[in-house]
Image (cartoon, grey):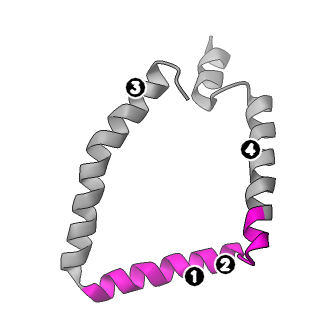
Amino acid sequence: MANSDFSRMLGGSPGAVLVKLIFMSVLVGAFLSLFGLTPPDLLRGLRDLVDRVMDLGFGAVREVFRYFVYGAVIVIPIWLLMRLFGRN
């Protein structure tokens, strides 16, 4: 029963999920390589985004957080229901 719960949490058997993740990683890596992006570039871009948002002031941060909460009120319950009722 514990294995079944574990498989359900992963979204399938561990081996199948591992193969899917490897395949998707190769596809995403090829896509990023096509555009000349590397993980350090992405992290640097994320850091720059956070810096720019902070430069706008905490009012902007408060506004973004409010958008996050508004969206999460809708997204999280839908995701939870989809996981509970087996819709991936």
Which is nearer the N-term, disc 3 or disc 4?
A: 4
Cα distance in 3D space between marks 3 and 2: 35 Å
Residue 48 is situated, as x and y percent measured from the top left of the image, at 48, 84
* Vertical position of residue 81 compared to residue 38: above or below: above
Disc number at residue 44? 1
SS assignment at label 3: helix
Q: Nearer the viewer, residue 62 or 14?
A: 62
Left or right of 16? Residue 55 is: left
> Residue placed farthest to the top in the image?
1
* Vertical position of residue 20 compared to residue 54: above or below: above
Q: Which residue is mark 2?
A: 40
Q: Residue at x 33, y 33 (%)?
A: 77
Instruction: Kindly indicate whether the residue at mark 4 contacts the one at mark 3 (C-beta within 8 angstroms).
Output: no
Could you classify mark 2 by the number of other residues whose Cα lies within 10 Å: few (under 14), some (14-19), or many (20 or more)?
Answer: few
Q: Which residue is mark 4?
A: 21
| Kind of residue at badge 1 | Arg
Instruction: Kindly indicate whether the residue at mark 1 contacts the one at mark 2 (C-beta within 8 angstroms).
Output: yes
For the stretch drawn in magenta, the main secondary structure is helix
Does residue 45 show up magenta in the picture? yes
| Kind of residue at badge 2 | Pro
Does residue 46 show up magenta in the picture? yes
Q: Which residue is mark 3?
A: 81
Which is nearer the N-term, disc 1 or disc 4?
A: 4
**Image quadrant in which the C terminus is located:** top right
Could you classify mark 3 by the number of other residues whose Cα lies within 10 Å: few (under 14), some (14-19), or many (20 or more)?
Answer: few
Instruction: Kindly indicate whether the residue at mark 2 contacts the one at mark 3 (C-beta within 8 angstroms).
Output: no
Q: Residue at x 73, y 34 (%)?
A: 17
Q: Residue at x 21, y 69 (%)?
A: 62
